[in-house]
Image: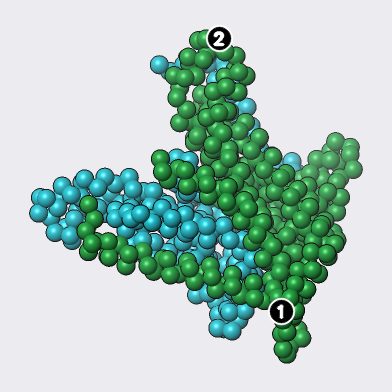
Chain colours: A cyan, B green
Amino acid sequence: MARSVTTSRKTMTTLFAGTLGLLIFFPVLWIVILSFKSEGDAIKAPLEVLFSTGWTAESYSAVQARSDYPKHFLNSVVIAFGSTLLGLLIAIPAAWAMAFVPAKRTKHVLMWMLSTKMLPPVGVLIPIYLIYRDLGILDSRIGLVFVLMMINLPIIIWMLFTYFREIPGEVLEAARMDGASLREEIIHVLAPMAIPGMASTALLNIILAWNEAFWTLNLTSAKAAPLTAFIASYSSPEGLFYAKLSAASVMAIAPILVLGWFSQKQLVRGLTFGAVK
Amino acid sequence: MATNASRAAARLMISPAVVLLLGWMLVPLGLTLYFSFLRYNLITPGANPFIGWENYYWFLTDPSFKAAMINTLLLVGGVLLITVIGGTMMALLLDQPMWGQGVIRIMVIAPFFVMPTVSGLVWKNMFMNPVNGIFGHLALGLGMEPLSFFSEIPLLSIIFIVSWQWLPFATLILLTALQSLDQEQLEAAEMDGATWVSRFIHVMLPHLARAITVVILIQTIFLLSIFAEILVTTNGGPGTSTTNLTYLIYVSSLLQFDVGMGSAGGVIAIILANIVAIFLMRMIGKNLDA
């Protein structure tokens, strides 16, 4: 039985929660507004900014022109998607085997994999940096793809494992009894049940890799710098730059904001390693 | 029922992941440990002699280590306090019936998806800049002196920015946990005449305890490694007032090129993180049995 709530109380809750939500969201909203203002307008008092009538997209073209924005965007895409795909390629068989052919040690293996995620990145920064320098892959996309794949691999395996574990094994046996070949079993029975889990795992991992800002800042300088590092170049101010910084920021976070909103549920499962569902 | 053949296949399927993770863990870890006992500076080429615990000695007795430890504790503790209390309140609020809950939820979650360098720079420039920032304009409007955030309350400013990023995470997880609470239990308590406060303390809080623990442990792992927000706002300063352990190690290894010293710091960071990790692993391990 649903609890009945008076309309006035519901209105009050909505107003209160809406105001709080808007306050939390405000910085994001604000940079969207500033990004369409001229540099001169962008540093005015908030109300003046809001009611200044000039709207312009010139900051967006200025950002593109000034710093080779498309290159950094492409780097982010390659690094985020590359590390995710590579991670899935290695994690899917592993998670699969652990979910469907569990052995006595499976639990220990899983826990151990998780423990590698606890390693603070700064603890292994120096060796990775020196190895990369010697291999000549500092500031290279391939180097970052590998590092980000490694730091997120435990999360990918765990997430896939929790999804695969929910697929009932009986279904497989039933299919086998009906004379399905292994190939048919995989294509017609397993894949439809496993794909949603794999998709949400990929989604969460793309978000994590896109926003990763320790390795991307420390292992790149110019050539392979993704958006996290590109934005960091605005930390030394030059003249008026609020509108340009806003435009660059909006372009950097917009794609992932959209993906993130779709993945709220998976986020909880993935980041708590299945401890909260 | 697994046959021997399928077991062998399973091992084969797991092995690439195991080999990679093992290498990822052992090689850098071993090297960090090894470097930490050497006099090894990238600026002074030549032999790198073994010097025992000397790096540890200098790292641990350096006043900036003590400062960094305190800053790390304050940063992690402050953000945890704000996000856990704030997140619980947000979750309770969002669990109430209201219109447009989906939209409000989306707005609350958004900061989590903003990359660290963007949130650092946006707060620093558009909000906390004493001349052009919104807070500065607000203070002037109210007839007050604008606050110069990063020179007067640098660490608090960073705690604030990081809390903004992590509040959504706590809210989302606690909300998920809250929604799995048995509604009948709450209604029974309500019929027995329990007030909202006692319902919260005796029914909701025990149910949330586990989720809160998970939030604390996972956030701690990430918060110990806060880096980008400091790099783009204060560079660890003024002085060492916003230098945390991660940033201190970054400074000694990549800015001062002191591989030995940085590695000694790295080993200490690993030990600290492991203490947290042990608790987290226990929590998750329990869940695996269930």
Residue B72: x, y in percent?
Answer: 73, 53
Q: Check the image and report above or below for A92 versus B280.
A: below
Q: Is residue A170 visible?
A: yes
Q: Nearer the viewer, residue A2 or B27?
A: B27
Crowding at dot 1, Cα within 10 Å, few <14 / some 14-19 / many 20+, comes out as: many
Q: Secondary structure at mark 2?
A: loop
Residue A228 marker: none
Relative side of B104 to A171, left or right? right
Q: Is residue A267 visible?
A: no
Pick the quarter of the image with the C terminus of chain B.
top left
Q: Are marks 1 and 2 on the same chain?
A: yes
Residue annotated with mark 1: B38
Q: Residue at x 15, y 47 (%)?
A: A174
How far apart marks 1 and 2 lie (CA) works out to 69 Å
Residue annotated with mark 2: B193
Q: Check the image and report above or below for B237 versus B81.
A: below
Q: Residue at x 43, y 55 (%)?
A: A108
Q: Closer to the camera: disc 1 or disc 2?
A: 1
Q: Check the image and report above or below for B128 versus A70.
A: above
Residue B196: x, y in percent?
Answer: 59, 17
Crowding at dot 2, Cα within 10 Å, few <14 / some 14-19 / many 20+, comes out as: few
Relative side of B256 to A16, left or right? right
Quadrant of the rendered structure where residue B174 is? Answer: top right
Residue B40: x, y in percent?
Answer: 72, 81
